[in-house]
Image: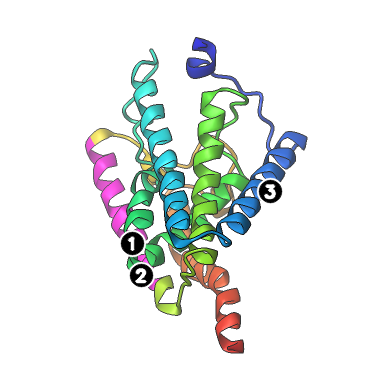
């Protein structure tokens, strides 16, 4: 049991059969959940969304508590302040309130940032708690935003792109401040992650930060484009 919760390994291989099977399971379960929820009453839809987001948030909190008890705990790396963990902590605010402004800000951050973490995982643990936490939290965030879109019938607008961008800037400034105080690297503002990610294509520090700032709005617009086409047809 201790090995499951506290053990570490590097048995996961990105872009392998493992990765394909896990991705297929995530897509299948997400599709089934959304398809099922669309046929339920609003009360059940809201309850299901709240359970999903609460589970995501509690998983991050539980994982963070476990990290404290690990002998190699490092507050510069193990606090739940990286983008996906941070989003996981606040995602229940959207599901419980269902306020559109929260959807607008979180939609593009999650689909652009968290989805990339599923395509190019930064954690190579396999079949331990860290593995299940990583995949449940990241895939859960993406699934819930699609859930909010197709079940709650929320849709982003062009203005949402810029609201999400502003939200990202607020988060980045906050992480710059925290990293300065702690000597940490949350949101990778001081250096790139050790694992292979898309940031490797964007050059070294601080170049990759400026590249991300330049391309993030076009990337958000690309995500928004199918919704634009849908609105145009109507």
Q: Quadrant of the C terminus?
A: bottom right
Q: Describe the element under mark 2 as helix, strand or loop.
A: helix
Mark 3 — residue?
28
Mark 2 — residue?
163
Q: Describe the element under mark 1 as helix, strand or loop.
A: helix
Q: Residue at x 49, y 49 (%)?
A: 141
Q: Residues within 10 Å of mark 2 (few under 14, many from 20)?
A: some
Q: Residue at x 52, y 11 (%)?
A: 1
Quarter-of-image position of residue 230: bottom right
- Percent position of residue 178, x then y: 25, 42
Circle number at residue 167: 1
Question: Disc 3 to disc 1, how far (Cα)?
Answer: 31 Å
Q: Is residue 44 above or below residue 191?
A: below
Q: Residue at x 46, y 69 (%)?
A: 154
Q: Is residue 28 magenta?
A: no
Q: Which residues are magenta?
A: 162-181
Contact between marks 2 and 1 (CB within 8 A): the answer is yes
Q: Is residue 167 magenta?
A: yes
SS majority, magenta: helix
Please tell me which of labels 3 and 1 falls first in the chain.
Answer: 3
Q: Is residue 10 above or below residue 205?
A: above
- Percent position of residue 167, x then y: 33, 61
Whether residue 192 is visible, yes or no, is: yes
- From the viewer's side, name the closer residue of 34 and 177: 34
Q: Residue at x 64, y 46 (%)?
A: 29
Please tell me which of labels 2 and 3 falls first in the chain.
Answer: 3
Q: How is the image coloured?
A: rainbow
Question: Disc 2 to disc 3, how far (Cα)?
Answer: 31 Å
Q: Nearer the viewer, mark 2 or mark 3?
A: 3
Q: Residues within 10 Å of mark 1 (few under 14, many from 20)?
A: some
């Amino acid at each position: 049991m201790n090995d499951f919760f506290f053990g570490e390994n590097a048995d996961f291989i990105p872009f392998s059969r493992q990765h394909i099977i896990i991705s297929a399971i995530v897509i299948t379960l997400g599709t089934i959940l959304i398809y099922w929820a669309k046929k339920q009453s609003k009360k059940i839809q809201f309850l299901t969304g709240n359970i999903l987001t609460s589970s995501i948030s509690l998983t991050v909190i539980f994982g963070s508590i476990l990290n404290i008890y690990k002998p190699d705990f490092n507050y510069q790396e193990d606090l739940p302040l990286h983008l996906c963990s941070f989003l996981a902590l606040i995602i229940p605010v959207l599901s419980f309130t269902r306020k559109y402004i929260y959807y607008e800000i979180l939609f593009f951050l999650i689909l652009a940032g968290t989805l990339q973490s599923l395509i190019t995982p930064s954690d190579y643990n396999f079949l331990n708690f860290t593995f299940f936490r990583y995949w449940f939290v990241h895939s859960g965030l993406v699934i819930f935003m699609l859930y909010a879109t197709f079940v709650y019938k929320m849709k982003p607008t062009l203005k949402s792109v810029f609201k999400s961008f502003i939200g990202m800037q607020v988060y980045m400034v906050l992480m710059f401040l925290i990293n300065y105080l702690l000597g940490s690297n949350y949101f990778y503002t001081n250096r790139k992650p050790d694992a292979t990610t898309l940031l490797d294509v964007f050059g070294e520090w601080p170049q990759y930060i400026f590249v991300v700032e330049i391309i993030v709005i076009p990337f958000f617009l690309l995500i928004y484009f199918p919704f634009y086409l849908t609105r145009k047809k109507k």
